Image (cartoon, helix red, strand yellow):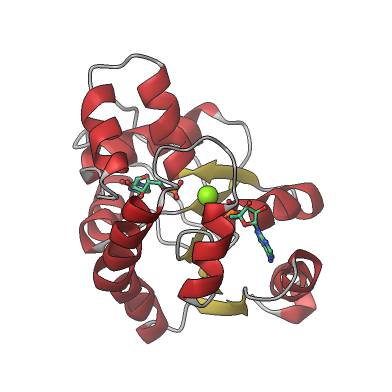
Amino acid sequence: MGTVVDSTNKEATGSLPINKKVKVVFVLGGPGSGKGTQCANIVEHFGYTHLSAGDLLRAEIKSGSENGTMIQNMIKEGKIVPSEVTIALLQRAIQENGNDKFLIDGFPRNEENRAAFERVTGIQPDFVLFFDCPEEEMEKRLLSRNQGREDDNIETIRKRFKVYMESSLPVIEYYKSKEKVQKIDAAKPVNEVFNAVKAVFTPSGGK
Ligand code: ADP
Ligand code: C5P
Ligand code: MG
């Protein structure tokens, strides 16, 4: 259960070290696999706090921060923002929140994200929830998401799929080798996917 963290590492510039015991679940899967949708359900039923790395980065653009333009350009190109930026946002969100259970959605997205988060925060995930979904289904969902996102267009979607295959899947493979992955068939309807998710979060049904 959880990781005791008393980090004094200031590598993620400007962020406070995390000095409380937290339980972290990484929620991974391709763009449009349903991570955000299912995290909302998990929050409601299991009392976690949902931290979406993509949402934190989009909020940072809106806040007019000095990194805003760089983040916006990276998102438009489907590229992964340097870890120090994303980790500082995650650290601050964890530190400022009174909860001790977090779903970290869409992070770590590459090996650099994974290694830097572990190094800076000292946190290891309890497990990784992996939403497995065919690309054509994810493409269909993204093209009809309608949230006004600048990256939900076919050109950027293709770039995001490429980054996912080349950089994010190896992270899932890494956690598989550590027997930390709970794989969910995410191609099914929302309620069926959540039934599978519930089994993972219910004490007798998984980790
Ligand atoms: P992600 O956070 O993984 O990118 P979202 O949760 O934002 O994915 O879902 C992408 C789109 O697909 C949204 O419009 C959402 O309503 C829809 N969606 C999510 N899960 C399903 C599902 N199981 N079946 C059909 N559509 C889904
Ligand atoms: O997870 P989401 O689809 O919201 O991510 C949108 C974009 O945010 C990604 O395509 C990427 O450009 C950026 N991102 C990132 N690093 C992360 C998560 C998201 O750079 N760990
Ligand atoms: Mg999302």
* Quadrant of res 115: bottom left
- Residue drawn 75% across the image and 70% down it: 189
Visible residue check, residue 69: yes
- Residue drawn 41% across the image and 37% down it: 150
* Quadrant of res 65: top left
Q: Quadrant of the C terminus?
A: bottom right
- Residue drawn 20% across the image and 57% down it: 112
37 relative to 158, above or below: above
162 relative to 14, above or below: below
Q: Position of residue 194 (x, y in %)?
A: 75, 67
Disc tally is 0
Q: Nearer the viewer, residue 85 or 135?
A: 135
Visible residue check, residue 23: no
Quarter, ligand 1: bottom right
* Quadrant of res 88: top left
146 relative to 24, above or below: above
Q: Residue furthest top?
A: 64
- Residue drawn 32% across the image and 53% down it: 155
Q: Is residue 154 left or right of residue 41?
A: left
Q: Is residue 48 left or right of residue 205?
A: left
Q: Position of residue 143 (x, y in %)?
A: 53, 54
Q: Is residue 29 left or right of residue 205?
A: left
13 relative to 40, above or below: above
Q: Position of residue 60 (x, y in %)?
A: 38, 25
Q: Quadrant of the N terminus?
A: bottom right
Q: Position of residue 21 (x, y in %)?
A: 52, 46
Q: Nearer the viewer, residue 133 or 42?
A: 133
